Image (tube, grey):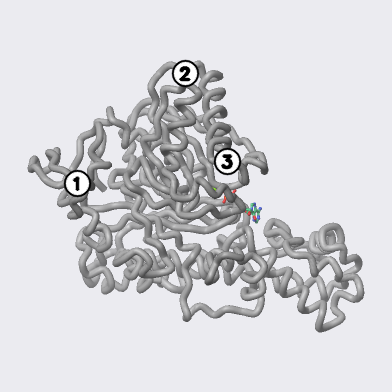
C-alpha cells in the first residue's frame, strides 16, 4: 500500500491508487460560525443538510433530509439529475424560510473527480450504477451551480468534496489530531493529510504557466508568490511555500497488489461485476471489503459447497442467484449467538429458500460468513496501517523520513496520538467486523502504538463535513488556517 501511495503521488496513472488532489489545504477547526448547507450525492440516497455552528466546535443545530434518487435519473441526462438536486435544495430552503440569503454550499459528490480547485472538478467516471454519459468530463460543481441558477437560488458551491474528505473535515472539527478518514459502507475509500512537497505530481501544476498560476499576496509570509488561480478567487490565500499540507483522496477501493492473495470466489465476483468496457479489473480492494460485495462472496462459496457436496441437500437452487445473500444478512448469520442458531435457520429458510438445514450445516454457514468478514476487516486494518506508515505514525519511525511535523518518534518517546475518522453503514452496523478490525490493528501495530490510534465514528460526517468545509472555504471566511 505504501509503495503504491508513493507511485500514485509521483504521477497520474503511476498506480492503481489514483491519489487525487482535493485542493483542501484548510480544515474546520471548531472556530466556524454561522449557517451552512450541503448536498450529499453519492449512492442510493441523497441528502440535503443544514448545519448551524458556533465557536468552540459546537453544532447548535443540524437538519438532515434523506431522499432516494429516482432510478431513471441515474441513467438520464445531466440536466435532469442536477435540476432534481437543485429543486430539492430549493424546497428545503423554502421550508427553512432561508432562500433569500447568499449561502455557501458544500457539495459531497462521491464519485472519482479530477479537481481543478477546491470548488470545481470534472467527473472521471460514474460508479455505483450511475451512467449518464454526457456528465463524464464535465465540471460537476458548475453543473450544480447552473441548476441552482435556473431555480433562482442565490447559492453557490464553495467546496466540492468526496465523502471521505467530508468525513475527515468533521473528524478534524472535533479533534485536530485527525489525520485520515475511511469509509466502509456500500463501497470503501480513504483520504489523509499529505505534505504538499510529497505530492510530486502537483509540483508541475504549481509551476505550470499557461493560465494556471498568477502572482498574489500571501497573507501568511507576506510575500508575492505564485498561486494556483483557482485557489485565490475571492479570498485570502497563502502561497505554495506556506501551503504545507493538502488532503489526498486515495480512491483506495481500486488498490491492487500482487501480494494480495486472490481466491476463486474473488475472480468469479470480478467477472460478475466487471464493466464490459473495462480492460482490467476495477475496485479490487473494495470488492474484498465493502458492503456491496461481502454477502455475494459468501454466496459464491456456499454455492460451490452445494455443488460439490450434499450439505444443503437438494434445496440449494437459490444459491445460484447472484446477490441473493446481502451483507446485512451475512452479518445477521455471523452475529447469531443462540445455541441452536435459530437466526441462521431463519435467514436460510426465508432468504435462501433452504429449509431444514441441520445444525452442523448451519455452523458451516456461520464459519463461511466469519471468514469473509475477518478477511474484509483485516484488509481494511492493513490499509489503515498503510496510511499510518506513510505518515510515520505506525511506530516504526522509519518510512516518513521527510515529514518532521507528522513524523515518527525518537527512541523512548510516547507514540503520537492519531485519530482516524470513520463512517459507513457496514462499519457502523456490524460490530463483529469492528472487533476484527481493532484486533488486526493491535496485531500489526503492537499494543502500545495501537493505543495511540483512535478510530472515531463521525455520523453523517460526509455531509456535515462538507457544510463545514463550505464555511472554511467561503469568501467571507476569516478562519482559514493551513493544516
Ligand atoms: P453509502 O456507501 O451508499 O453511503 P452506507 O454508508 O449507508 O452507504 O452503507 C450501506 C452499506 O452498509 C450497505 O451496502 C450494507 O451492505 C451495509 N450495511 C448497512 N447496515 C448493515 C448491517 N447492520 N450489517 C452489515 N452491513 C450493513
Ligand atoms: Mg455514504
Q: Is residue 230 above or below residue 272?
A: above
Tell whether label 1 touches label 2 (CB within 8 Å).
Answer: no
Q: Secondary structure at mark 2?
A: loop
Q: Secondary structure at mark 3?
A: loop
x and y, in percent, of residue 320 in the image = 80, 69
Residue that appears at 81% across and 83% down: 308
Indicate which label's residue lies in the foreground, 1 or 3.
Answer: 3
Q: Upstream in the sequence, badge 2 or badge 3? A: 3
Q: Residues within 10 Å of mark 3 (few under 14, many from 20)?
A: some
Q: Is residue 439 visible?
A: no
x and y, in percent, of residue 211 in the image = 21, 46
Q: Is residue 78 above or below residue 356?
A: above
- Beta carbon at label 2 within 8 Å of ligand 2: no
In three-dimensional space, the C-alpha distance between marks 2 and 3, rounded to whole angstroms, equals 29 Å
Q: Residues within 10 Å of mark 2 (few under 14, many from 20)?
A: few
Question: Which quadrant would residue 267 be assigned to in this image?
Answer: bottom right
Judging by the rendered image, the residue that carries numbered circle 3 is 77
Q: Which part of the image, by quadrant, shows the N terminus? A: bottom left
Q: Secondary structure at mark 1?
A: strand
Q: Which mark is residue 98?
A: 2
- The foreground one among 200 and 289 is 200
Indicate which label's residue lies in the foreground, 2 or 1.
Answer: 1
Q: Is residue 19 above or below residue 45?
A: below
- The foreground one among 153 and 366 is 153
Residue that appears at 45% across and 26% down: 149
Amino acid at each position: 500500500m505504501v509503495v503504491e501511495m508513493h507511485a500514485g503521488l509521483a504521477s497520474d496513472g503511476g498506480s492503481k491508487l489514483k491519489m487525487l488532489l482535493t485542493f483542501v489545504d484548510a480544515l474546520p477547526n471548531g472556530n466556524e460560525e454561522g449557517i451552512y448547507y450541503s448536498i450529499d450525492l453519492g449512492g442510493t440516497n441523497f441528502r440535503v443538510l443544514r448545519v448551524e455552528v458556533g465557536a468552540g466546535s459546537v453544532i447548535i443545530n443540524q437538519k438532515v433530509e434523506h431522499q432516494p434518487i429516482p432510478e431513471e435519473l441515474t441513467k438520464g441526462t445531466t440536466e435532469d439529475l442536477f435540476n432534481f438536486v437543485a429543486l430539492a435544495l430549493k424546497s428545503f430552503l423554502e421550508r427553512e424560510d432561508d432562500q433569500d440569503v447568499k449561502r455557501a454550499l458544500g457539495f459531497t459528490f462521491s464519485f472519482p473527480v479530477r479537481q481543478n480547485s477546491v470548488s470545481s472538478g470534472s467527473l472521471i467516471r460514474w460508479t455505483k450504477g450511475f451512467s449518464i454519459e454526457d456528465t463524464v468530463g464535465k465540471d460537476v460543481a458548475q453543473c450544480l451551480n447552473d441548476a441552482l441558477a435556473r431555480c433562482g437560488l442565490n447559492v453557490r458551491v464553495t467546496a466540492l468534496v468526496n465523502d471521505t474528505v467530508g468525513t475527515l473535515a468533521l473528524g478534524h472539527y472535533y479533534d485536530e489530531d485527525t489525520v485520515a478518514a475511511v469509509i466502509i459502507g456500500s463501497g470503501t475509500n480513504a483520504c489523509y493529510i499529505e505534505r504538499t512537497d510529497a505530492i510530486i505530481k502537483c509540483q508541475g501544476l504549481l509551476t505550470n504557466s499557461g493560465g494556471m498560476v498568477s502572482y498574489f499576496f500571501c497573507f501568511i509570509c507576506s510575500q508575492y508568490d505564485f498561486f494556483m488561480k483557482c485557489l485565490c478567487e475571492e479570498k485570502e490565500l497563502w502561497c505554495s511555500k506556506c501551503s504545507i499540507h493538502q488532503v489526498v483522496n486515495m480512491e483506495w477501493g481500486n488498490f491492487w497488489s500482487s501480494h494480495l492473495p486472490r481466491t476463486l470466489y474473488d475472480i468469479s465476483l470480478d467477472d460478475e461485476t466487471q464493466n464490459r468496457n473495462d480492460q482490467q479489473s476495477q475496485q479490487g480492494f473494495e470488492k474484498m471489503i465493502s458492503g456491496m460485495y461481502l454477502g455475494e462472496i459468501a454466496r459464491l462459496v456456499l454455492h460451490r459447497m452445494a455443488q460439490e457436496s450434499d450439505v444443503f441437500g437438494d434445496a440449494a437452487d437459490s444459491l445460484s442467484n447472484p446477490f441473493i445473500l446481502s451483507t446485512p444478512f451475512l452479518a445477521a448469520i455471523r452475529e447469531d449467538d443462540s445455541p441452536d442458531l435459530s437466526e441462521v435457520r431463519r435467514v436460510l429458510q426465508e432468504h435462501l429458500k433452504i429449509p431444514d438445514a441441520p445444525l452442523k450445516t448451519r455452523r458451516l454457514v456461520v464459519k463461511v460468513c466469519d471468514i469473509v468478514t475477518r478477511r474484509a476487516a483485516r484488509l481494511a486494518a492493513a490499509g489503515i496501517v498503510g496510511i499510518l506508515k506513510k505518515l510515520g505514525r505506525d511506530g516504526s519511525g522509519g518510512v516518513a523520513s521527510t515529514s518532521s511535523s507528522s513524523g515518527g518518534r525518537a527512541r523512548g518517546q510516547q507514540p503520537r496520538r492519531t485519530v482516524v475518522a470513520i463512517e459507513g453503514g457496514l462499519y457502523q452496523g456490524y460490530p463483529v467486523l469492528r472487533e476484527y478490525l481493532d484486533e488486526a490493528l493491535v496485531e500489526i501495530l503492537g499494543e502500545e502504538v495501537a493505543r495511540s490510534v483512535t478510530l472515531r465514528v463521525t455520523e453523517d460526517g460526509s455531509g456535515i463535513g462538507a457544510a463545514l468545509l463550505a464555511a472554511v472555504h467561503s469568501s467571507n471566511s476569516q478562519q482559514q488556517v493551513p493544516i
